[in-house]
Image: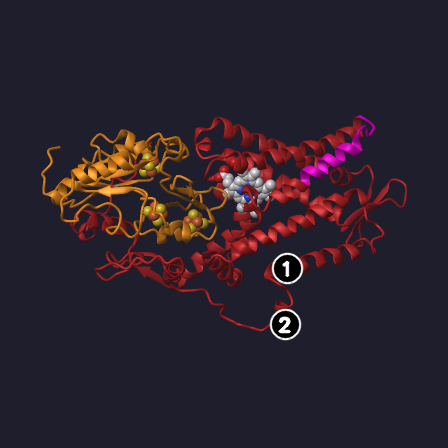
Chain colours: A red, B orange
């Protein structure tokens, strides 16, 4: 069995100063947030204390996030994709793949238009909300009113632009969070409807994994919208209480995020790495099937998979001298049949047929 | 009562009912995840089904960088989680039997999940429910043991799992007829 010995045993003093990778990442990130907030709030003179809860919540979230993702990144197959993916980021196709995979989700459209619309609404609703909320919370962005009727948007301590308080940009700025809430609520309702009605979706779902994140998102969006309702129509009635409830909903979701279904959000960029990896190494050299001679995967990926399985003490060397990983998939299936029957099915030059039933 | 999928391979008559049934499982989106092969296609009509054997130490799940392939508490090795699979196809290359299928358009792997919506409640999987020739059966360990006694050849040729497969599996496989030299009348 192979063990994973670190390739470069640098006695790097920075790395040794921390008990673990986890402690180091945590320390650096929190320091960065504090420094950014210090600069952006003009030395903490513009901190909104109502948002204190979010700050604590975010710090706890970052802890959970690093804990989960460092454990993940240490798994042998994950490590390979992250390491080689980072190297291949300079490929020409990266921007296109990234937009496709991370922004417009073409592949979800191929799973169904309904699922695609649902995810666009949830995903982009959340992204929009985060783009507005986080800069506000950490004081990276705020509004000041120097002259009557004129707002100045301050980004990272610099005056970004001055807009009319009743102008269109101002309207979008106040309402960005409401728009995002409506998007998320519609998207989540679509998801809930699908989970309740669609037999395909119902088959494998679990409460904690599939429903809890949806309820959390609804909880956030509804309490957020209620804040606006109280503001506009109820003269701020009960608003401080609702504000606390809303904060609570966001904090719980942030803490849950690295562990449940929503963990796909920070991990999905690896799909771009995986696509680059497959494209790049397929151009380098392709593996030929030991039986039929067809190309079926890049040599690099084949070797990586064999190595990863080796780490897990799995090896498929056959008595007749080859490794199962050297066969293309149809030949591998036929080889299995031959081992069951004693007749060399994989040597018969007939393509596999009749394997896809029409449902 | 825990039951297992048990295959008596040479009973197969090639009707492909199991393929059709597999399209109808919940979550399968009308695509089958199993295979039926002609053993010696240019000579005779013997066929055998091939499906995921639900390895105890599954190569597909071990090779997945996204932890998209979960192992259910019943031992079933599930299909990729739709939001986790990043489409690297490691699993298809890792599986010793070439079982996982990959959809490039959807950037998603899908494989036999032992009809988990049924088997988690003790209901037999779709393929075993429809198989007309008793090739695919859903049995308790005691029943499988009884079969083992019934077909015992005293020559060690009882082909269930180890050492005849690449690793320990949750599905049990057997070929009593062929190994006993009994000609079956289909
Ligand atoms: C980095 C970009 C993202 C990618 C590539 C991505 C990808 C995916 C995929 C492939 C699915 C499965 C969809 C299906 O097959 O029906 C999914 C589901 C889901 N995503 Fe994302 N996602 C991203 C960002 C987000 C964001 C920002 C959110 C906001 C919270 C989010 C929330 C969800 C939810 C709640 C589900 C489950 C829907 C259900 O219950 O069926 N995703 N995502
Ligand atoms: S037979 Fe293949 S797909 Fe099934 S559990 Fe084993 S490795 Fe995974
Ligand atoms: S294709 Fe999907 S399920 Fe298979 S190894 Fe890659 S990420 Fe995992
Ligand atoms: S157990 Fe279910 S998913 Fe697996 S091959 Fe049979 S019908 Fe298909």
**Residue B149: image location, x then y, percent:** 18, 39
**Residue A228: image location, x then y, percent:** 75, 32
Can you identify the residue that label 2 sits on? A13
* Picture residue at 42% right of the left edge, 40% below the top: B73
In the picture, measured across the screen, residue A266 lies left or right of residue A167, that is: left
Residue B16, quarter of the rendered image: top left
| Residue B87 visible in this rendered orientation of the protein | no
Nearer to me, A105 or A41: A41
* Gap between marks 2 and 1 measured at Cα: 15 Å
**Residue B55: image location, x then y, percent:** 34, 47
Question: In this picture, which residue range is highlighted in magenta?
Answer: A234-250
Question: What secondary structure is marked by label 2?
Answer: helix
In the picture, measured across the screen, residue A16 lies left or right of residue A172, that is: left
Can you identify the residue that label 1 sits on? A23
Q: Is residue A311 magenta?
A: no
| Residue A145 visible in this rendered orientation of the protein | yes
Nearer to me, A179 or A61: A61
Residue A223, quarter of the rendered image: top right
- The quadrant in which the N terminus of chain B is found is top left
**Does the Cβ of the disc 1 residue fall within 8 Å of ligand 1?**
no
Subunit of mark 1? A
Nearer to me, B174 or A128: B174
Subunit of mark 2? A
**Residue B75: image location, x then y, percent:** 38, 42
């Amino acid at each position: 069995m192979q063990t994973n010995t670190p390739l470069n045993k640098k006695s790097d003093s920075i790395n040794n100063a921390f008990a673990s990778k986890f402690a180091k990442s945590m320390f650096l990130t929190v320091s960065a947030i504090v420094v950014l907030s210090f600069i952006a709030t003009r030395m903490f003179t513009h901190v909104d204390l109502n948002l204190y809860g979010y700050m604590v919540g975010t710090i706890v979230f970052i802890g959970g996030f690093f804990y989960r993702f460092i454990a993940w990144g240490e798994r042998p197959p994950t490590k390979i994709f992250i390491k080689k993916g980072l190297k291949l980021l300079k490929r020409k196709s990266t921007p296109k793949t990234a937009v496709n995979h991370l922004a417009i989700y073409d592949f979800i459209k191929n799973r169904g238009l309904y699922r695609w619309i649902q995810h666009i609404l949830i995903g982009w609703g959340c992204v929009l909300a985060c783009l507005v909320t986080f800069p506000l919370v950490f004081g990276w962005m705020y509004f000041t009113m120097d002259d009557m009727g004129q707002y100045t948007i301050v980004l990272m301590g610099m005056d970004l632009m001055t807009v009319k308080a009743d102008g269109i940009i101002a309207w979008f700025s106040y309402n960005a969070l409401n728009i995002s809430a409506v998007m998320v609520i519609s998207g989540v309702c679509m998801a809930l409807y699908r989970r309740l009605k669609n037999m395909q979706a119902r088959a494998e779902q679990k409460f904690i994994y599939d429903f809890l994140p949806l309820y959390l998102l609804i909880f956030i969006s509804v309490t957020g919208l209620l804040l606006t309702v109280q503001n506009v129509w109820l003269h701020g009635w009960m608003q401080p209480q609702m504000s606390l409830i809303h904060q609570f909903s966001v904090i719980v979701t942030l803490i849950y995020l690295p562990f449940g279904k929503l963990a796909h959000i920070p991990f999905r960029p690896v799909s771009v790495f995986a696509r680059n990896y497959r494209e790049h190494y397929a151009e380098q050299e392709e593996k030929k099937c030991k039986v039929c001679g067809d190309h079926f995967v890049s040599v690099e990926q084949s070797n990586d998979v064999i190595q990863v399985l080796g780490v897990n003490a799995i090896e498929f060397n056959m008595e007749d001298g080859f490794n199962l990983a050297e066969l293309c998939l149809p030949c591998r299936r036929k080889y299995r049949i031959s081992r069951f029957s004693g007749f060399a099915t994989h040597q018969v030059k007939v393509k596999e047929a009749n394997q896809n039933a029409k449902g | 009562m825990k039951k297992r999928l048990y295959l008596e391979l040479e009973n197969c008559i090639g009707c492909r009912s199991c393929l059709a049934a597999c399209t109808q499982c919940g979550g399968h989106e009308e695509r089958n995840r199993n295979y039926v092969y002609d053993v010696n296609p240019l000579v005779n009509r013997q066929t055998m089904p091939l499906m995921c054997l639900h390895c105890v130490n599954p190569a597909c799940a071990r090779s997945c960088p996204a932890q998209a392939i979960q192992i259910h508490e019943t031992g079933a090795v599930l299909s990729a989680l739709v939001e986790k699979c990043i489409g690297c196809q490691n699993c298809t290359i890792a599986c010793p039997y070439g079982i996982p299928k990959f959809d490039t358009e959807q950037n998603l792997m899908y494989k036999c999940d032992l009809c988990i919506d049924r088997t988690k409640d003790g209901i037999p999987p779709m393929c075993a429910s429809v198989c007309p020739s008793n090739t695919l059966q859903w049995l308790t360990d005691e029943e499988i043991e009884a079969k083992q006694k019934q077909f015992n050849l005293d020559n060690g040729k009882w082909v269930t799992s180890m050492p005849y497969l690449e690793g320990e599996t949750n599905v049990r496989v057997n070929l009593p007829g062929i190994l006993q030299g009994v000609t079956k009348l289909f």
